[in-house]
Amino acid sequence: MDGNRRWAAAHGLPSIAGHVQGVETIKPIVRVAPDHGIEVLSLYVFSGENWRRSDEEVSGLFSLIDGAVRQNTDELIAQGVRVHVIGRLHEAPADIQRSIRDAEERTRGGSRMELNIAFNYSGRHEIVDAARALIAAGVPAAEVDEERFAEHLYTAGQPDPDLIIRTGAEQRTSNFLLWQGAYAELIFCATLWPAFTTQEFEAALAEFARRQRRYGA
């Protein structure tokens, strides 16, 4: 979900205003996604690299995420959406940890769609953490294969993503779902995330439906 800061600058607003609008953009996407048969939707909310931003912006992002999770959990429950955090949540401030864990617990019964919140997430960190978990479990090297490795990823038990959409005109995946996205279809959209609409989301789904997937065959 790229382009929050550029959207704010284009409107003569502080960066946090772009993030606020970015949160608002998430809501209609989450509402319509299950109607299109989407079983898992993953949102890259805060990357491991985002810690490099100014203390003021990071603090503002944390407050915004905390408030958004608290304010929208009831609606997610009503929609049948189950929240699942992926990333190193333990490195986040305690109040953020509590909010997200509470949302995970309260939405546990949701069966319509799983919502992955990628928070303090890095694809490389995920691969390292999976390797550490295998070592800690004492799995012999000869028994490590792709299936066994995937069991220790943050997304264990979920299907690999079929489609990755990136807004904001950049054409790279930026450390997102590096293992899982090996054969995902990619769509790069020039629209900055705060201006991204459900119509553009549905257009991306239509484009995905037109593609032929061969998985290297």
Image (spheres, helix red, strand yellow):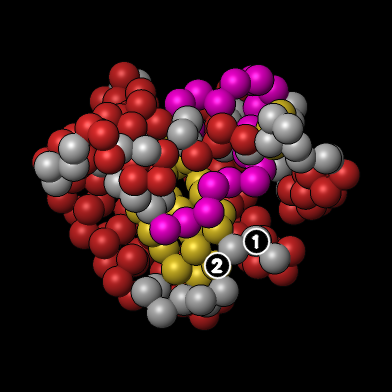
Mark closest to the chain's N terminus, 2 or 1: 1
Task: Note whether residue 115 is visible.
Answer: yes
Q: Position of residue 200 (x, y in %)?
A: 79, 45
Q: Is residue 16 left or right of residue 108?
A: right
Label 2 to label 1, Cα distance in Å?
7 Å
- 158 in magenta: yes
In the rendered image, the quadrant that contains the C terminus is top right
Q: Residue at x 56, y 32 (%)?
A: 182
Crowding at label 1, few (<14), some or many (≥20) Cα neighbours within 10 Å?
some
- 172 in magenta: yes
User: Would you identify the image quadrant in which residue 186 lies?
Assistant: top right
Residue 125 to residue 69: above or below: above
Instruction: Tell me the amino acid under the disc marked 2.
Output: Met
Instruction: Tell me the amino acid under the disc marked 1.
Output: Ile
User: Would you identify the image quadrant in which residue 68 lies?
Assistant: bottom left
- Image mark for residue 38: 1
Q: Is there CB contact under 8 Å for labels 2 and 1?
A: yes
Magenta region: 157-176
- Image mark for residue 113: 2
Q: Is residue 15 left or right of residue 206?
A: left
